[in-house]
Image (cartoon, rainbow, N blue to C red):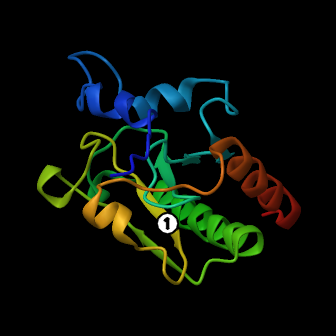
Amino acid sequence: MDNLHAPWRIDYILAPKNPAPGRQSVFSEIAASSDDISNHVLARGKTCFAVLNAYPYSCGHSMVIPYRQVSDLTELTDAELLESQHVLQRLQRAMRATMNPAGFNIGLNLGKVAGAGIVEHLHWHIVPRWEGDTNFMPVIGNTGVMPEAMLDVAAKIRASLEAHGA
């Protein structure tokens, strides 16, 4: 049997899934950080920001996250809700221009039973998809294969966001 090593996954596997009492979510920590390159931040707005998912389903898998830590859509202000949707649109345009996906999965998971990995801080996922990108690796091997480094993907998406403005 051949083995595919994905050593970056161990950090996720071993990391606590909920913040310690009194500690912010990982998203709040990224929001407060000024190191956008290391954190793979793609864009920042007034009420939300976009970041590549550190544990992606496919290349380019990103998230749009309000700065304010809330766990439910009903807790968002109108400004947070509107800007997050605009950022999702911008990301979709940028991904189309740079990655040429055949489609997208866009959505959010609210609550642990719905699949939310970071329950306390809601976030939208935008996952570019290509014909045939679902193969035996994630289905049988529970392993994803990313064809491009995250720093390269982030740089391409950032450049496209800047080139297309708005």
Give the labeled residue for mark 1.
127
Question: Looking at the rendering, which quadrant does residue 24 occupy?
Answer: top left
Q: Is residue 10 left or right of residue 109?
A: right
Task: Determine the residue located farthest toward the right in the rendered image.
Answer: 163
Q: Is residue 62 left or right of residue 19?
A: right
Q: Position of residue 94 (x, y in %)?
A: 72, 67
| 25 or 67: nearer the viewer | 25
Packing grade of label 1 (10 A; few <14, some 14-19, many >=20) is: many
Quadrant placement of the C terminus: bottom right
Question: Looking at the rendering, which quadrant does residue 19 occupy?
Answer: top left
Question: Looking at the rendering, which quadrant does residue 38 occupy?
Answer: top right
Which kind of residue does numbered mark 1 sit on?
Val
101 vs 126: above or below: below
| 21 or 154: nearer the viewer | 154
Q: Give the residue at x 63% y 45%.
A: 150
Task: Determine the residue located farthest toward the front in the rendered image.
Answer: 1
Q: Give the residue at x 52% y 59%.
A: 84
Q: Give the residue at x 27% y 26%.
A: 14
Q: Position of residue 13 (x, y in %)?
A: 28, 33
SS assignment at label 1: strand
Q: Give the residue at x 29% y 57%.
A: 141
| 63 or 15: nearer the viewer | 15
Q: Position of residue 149 (x, y in %)?
A: 65, 46
